[in-house]
């Protein structure tokens, strides 16, 4: 049976001051009239039943997530008691799914991606499921054809093509290797080669296969996650979860499994994708005016070029003779930063943390 895991953690740093610890980007309506989390669940409609969907998030976000997803059973939203990256998140979900369905096939997707059209996403999932059913020991990931030499994404280098039936032109390849985030020159080489994809961080596999892989390469992690799963239906669940999950060593699923696994397949995504990793991504998705400005809310700009402005209709932002800025207004904080420095927002959030100004986090 097909199941889904939506990873919906996050610290609310990259889109500060709109996003906060208790309201990270996946809970915001940054693109469209639905939050990113709601859109992630919407994409799975028709593929996975609500009762077969799990959402893993930070424990402090559980009430907000449940409020946004009333169609899911309350127990489908799981709050992690500690931040431990994607491998423990995915591993625990796989252990839990295996207790319900030993032959479970999992779709794993982050909650903060922007993907369209939904029909192409569903078609690509169908190809991935077909590949897994044909070879249950296989792990499937998705590659996005790069459109510019991005330095902020990991890359996948493809190998030989695979035969897949009924795919309506969707291609799949053996993965030759994973590559870390490159410098500019290397990213330009990847773009020119035509055999590299951006790593979308979306996966399809058998729950049992990913569990076996964790036992092979991360046995200490697997042992702790198994003990948590064994206590899940008992009165000791909360205590065991909090105690043992804190002991798990945080690691991404790429480092823990994907870069080590011998049989990984990449499906060439037919859909458009953006991980909405910074305010600059909003410009890619929301578009720009003739002066290169991206505006959400009320703005009066004179001699203003290349700026990203975000407010609401109650507050006017007026700019004169400025360029290449990010300007974001909220009720209690205003951000003004250079557009070209994507790490500036994180640096500011870190400075707030250091000063103890937690009311702004």
Image (cartoon, rainbow, N blue to C red):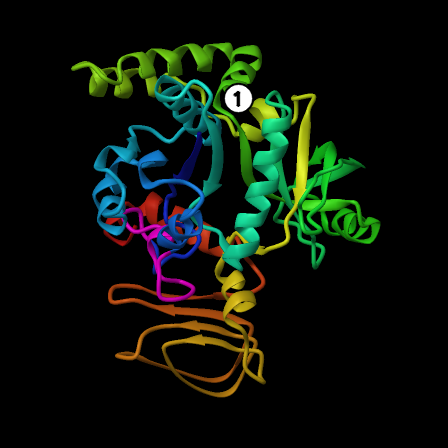
Viewer-proximal residue, 297 or 325? 297
Residue 304 on image: x %, y %: 52, 83
Rendered image quadrant of residue 230: top left
Q: Is residue 328 left or right of residue 270?
A: left
Rendered image quadrant of residue 120: bottom right
- Point 83% across, 49% down: residue: 193
Q: Is residue 23 magenta?
A: yes
Q: Is residue 212 left or right of residue 49?
A: right
- Point 58% across, 78% down: residue: 292
Is 272 situated above or below 95? below
**Magenta segment:** 20-35
Viewer-proximal residue, 345 or 101? 101
Q: Quadrant of the N terminus?
A: top left
- In the rendered picture of this protein, how many numbered marks are placed on residues? 1
Residue 59 on image: x %, y %: 26, 35
Q: Which residue is mark 1?
A: 210
- Point 68% across, 51% down: residue: 168
Q: Is residue 198 magenta?
A: no
Viewer-proximal residue, 176 or 205? 205
Residue 343 on image: x %, y %: 52, 52
């Amino acid at each position: 049976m097909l199941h889904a895991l939506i990873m919906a953690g996050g610290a609310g740093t990259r889109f500060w001051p709109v996003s906060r610890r208790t309201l990270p980007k996946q809970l915001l309506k940054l693109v469209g009239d639905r939050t990113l989390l709601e859109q992630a669940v919407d994409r799975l409609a028709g593929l996975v039943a609500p009762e077969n969907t799990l959402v893993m998030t930070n424990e402090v976000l559980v009430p907000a997530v449940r409020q946004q997803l009333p169609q899911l059973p309350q127990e489908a939203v799981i709050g992690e008691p500690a931040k431990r990256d994607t491998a423990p998140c995915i591993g625990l979900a796989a252990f839990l799914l295996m207790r319900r369905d030993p032959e479970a096939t999992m779709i794993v997707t982050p909650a903060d991606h922007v993907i369209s059209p939904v029909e192409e996403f569903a078609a690509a999932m169908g190809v991935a499921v077909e590949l897994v059913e044909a070879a249950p020991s296989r792990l499937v990931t998705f590659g996005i054809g790069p459109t510019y030499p991005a330095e902020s994404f990991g890359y996948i280098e493809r190998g030989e093509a695979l035969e897949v039936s009924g795919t309506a032109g969707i291609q799949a390849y053996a993965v030759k290797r994973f590559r870390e985030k490159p410098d500019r020159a290397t990213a330009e080489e990847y773009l020119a080669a035509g055999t590299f994809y951006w790593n979308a961080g979306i996966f399809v596999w058998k729950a049992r296969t990913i569990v076996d892989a964790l036992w092979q390469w991360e046995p200490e992690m697997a042992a702790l996650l198994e003990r948590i799963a064994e206590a899940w239906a008992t009165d000791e669940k909360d205590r065991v979860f909090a105690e043992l999950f804190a002991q798990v060593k945080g690691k991404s699923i790429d480092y823990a499994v994907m870069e080590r696994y011998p049989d990984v397949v990449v499906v060439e995504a037919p859909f458009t994708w953006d991980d909405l990793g910074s305010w600059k991504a909003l410009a890619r998705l929301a578009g720009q005016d003739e002066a290169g400005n991206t505006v959400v809310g009320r703005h009066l700009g004179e001699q203003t070029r290349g700026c990203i402005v975000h407010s609401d209709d109650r507050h006017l932002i007026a700019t004169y003779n400025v360029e290449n800025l990010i300007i974001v207004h909220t009720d209690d904080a205003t951000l003004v930063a250079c557009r070209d420095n994507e790490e500036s927002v994180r640096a500011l959030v870190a400075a707030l943390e250091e000063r103890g100004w937690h009311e702004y986090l």
